[in-house]
């Protein structure tokens, strides 16, 4: 999987939310100060070249839509995080986040219940 830059990921988050949108529609979803039209247009074209986005012609412009689903990207990104920073151990990652975020027993029980439901 090709990696996304921060700007690319921000645009993808908007497209996942919108499902489809023009560059102007994407910009509208950004908080102020809004990025420049040319900047977002360039990022969208880069995302298209990386295979994350495609487009359809609509009038004189284009409507862009994601080719990769958010869930698929999340799974790949988390797997890479676990592999690169926690030696492939999900347990080590959860332990790290528990220590850093002061998780309480209730949070841990919720996680365990979700794991049991998936098994």
Image (tube, grey):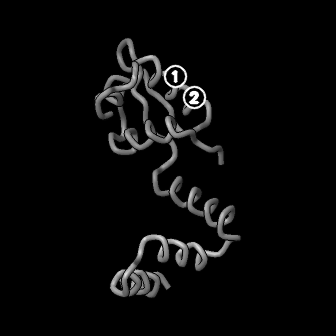
Percent x, y of residue 84: 69, 61
Q: Could you say which quadrant of the image residue 60 lies in?
A: top left
CB within 8 Å, label 2 to label 1: yes
Residue 50, labelled with which disc? none
Q: Residues within 10 Å of mark 2 (few under 14, many from 20)?
A: some
Q: Is residue 108 above or below residue 86?
A: below
Q: Which residue is mark 1?
A: 42
**Relative to 92, residue 6 above or below:** above
Measured from the top left, where is residue 119 in percent x and y? 50, 85
Tag 2, which secondary structure?
helix
**Taking 38 as reference, is 73 above or below it?**
below
Who's the residue at 61% across and 30% down the image? 49
Q: Residues within 10 Å of mark 1 (few under 14, many from 20)?
A: few
Residue at x-position 52% and y-position 40%: 6
Residue 13: image location, x then y, percent: 41, 43
In the displayed image of the protein, which residue is found farthest to the top?
60
Residue under the image location 49 percent in, 41 percent down: 9
Is 82 placed above or below 64 here? Answer: below
Q: Which residue is mark 2?
A: 46
């Amino acid at each position: 999987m090709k990696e996304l830059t921060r700007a690319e990921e921000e645009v993808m988050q908007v497209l996942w939310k919108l499902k489809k949108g023009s560059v102007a529609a994407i910009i509208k979803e950004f908080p102020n100060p809004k990025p420049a039209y040319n900047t977002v247009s360039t990022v969208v074209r880069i995302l298209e070249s990386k295979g994350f986005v495609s487009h359809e012609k609509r009038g004189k412009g284009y409507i862009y839509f994601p080719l990769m689903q958010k869930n698929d990207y999340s799974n790949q990104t988390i797997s890479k995080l676990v592999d690169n920073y926690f030696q492939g151990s999900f347990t080590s990652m959860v332990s790290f986040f528990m220590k850093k975020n002061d998780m309480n027993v209730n949070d841990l029980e919720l996680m365990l219940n979700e794991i049991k439901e998936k098994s």
